[in-house]
């Protein structure tokens, strides 16, 4: 009968005891105190959980913004470097011509061997 699925198991049991005895009053007071503490803990945990969810949402937003910024930087960085190199070659071409000639000479000597 104990494991019979047809018999519902109650969530809580109410005990009908005379409240004029000091023991019953003490037990009921302890149970009420425990229930109040449990409700306070549940409320506190729910507040913490909602604060954590809010913080997670803010973190997701920050990560999204950072990834968008990083993506833009990766796309723009090569073009900025290329523009910078073009500007430097146009303003002062002699050193870059010497670098190119030196590299060609070294590469040509390497190929002769």
Image: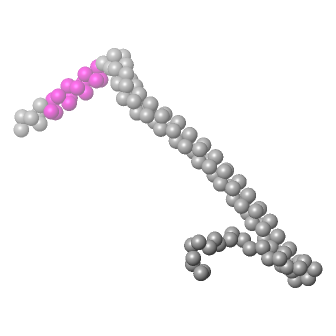
**Does residue 51 lie above or below 23 as drawn?**
above
**Residue found at the very far left of the displayed protein:** 113
Residue 42: give x, y in percent of width and height.
71, 61
Which residue is at 69% across, 69% downward? Answer: 11
Q: What stretch is highlighted in magenta?
A: 94-107
Magenta residues, dominant SS class: helix
Residue 60 occupies quadrant: top right
Which residue is at 25% across, 27% downward? Answer: 99
Residue 81: give x, y in percent of width and height.
37, 27
Q: Can residue 4 be seen in this view?
A: yes
Residue 33 occupies quadrant: bottom right
For this rendering, which residue is in front, 23 or 55?
23
Is residue 95 on the magenta stretch? yes
For this view, does 19 lie left or right of residue 93? right
Looking at the rendered image, the quarter that the N terminus falls into is bottom right
**Residue found at the very far right of the displayed protein:** 20
For this view, does 93 lie left or right of residue 50? left
Residue 6 occupies quadrant: bottom right
Residue 113: give x, y in percent of width and height.
6, 38
Which residue is at 20% across, 29% downward? Answer: 102
**Does residue 101 lie above or below 4 as drawn?**
above
**Does residue 59 lie above or below 12 as drawn?**
above
Q: Is residue 92 visible?
A: no
Which residue is at 29% across, 19% downward? Answer: 94
For this rendering, which residue is in front, 55 or 19?
19
**Residue found at the very far front of the displayed protein:** 6
Residue 96: give x, y in percent of width and height.
28, 23
């Amino acid at each position: 009968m104990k494991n019979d699925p047809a018999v519902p198991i109650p969530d809580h049991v109410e005990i009908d005891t005379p409240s004029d005895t000091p023991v019953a009053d003490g037990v009921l007071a302890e149970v009420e105190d425990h229930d109040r503490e449990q409700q306070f803990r549940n409320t506190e945990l729910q507040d913490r959980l909602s604060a954590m969810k809010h913080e997670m949402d803010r973190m997701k937003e920050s990560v999204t913004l950072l990834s968008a910024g990083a993506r833009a930087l990766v796309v723009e960085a090569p073009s900025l470097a290329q523009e910078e190199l073009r500007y430097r070659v146009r303003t002062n071409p002699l050193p870059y011509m010497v670098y190119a000639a030196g590299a060609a000479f070294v590469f040509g000597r390497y190929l002769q061997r």
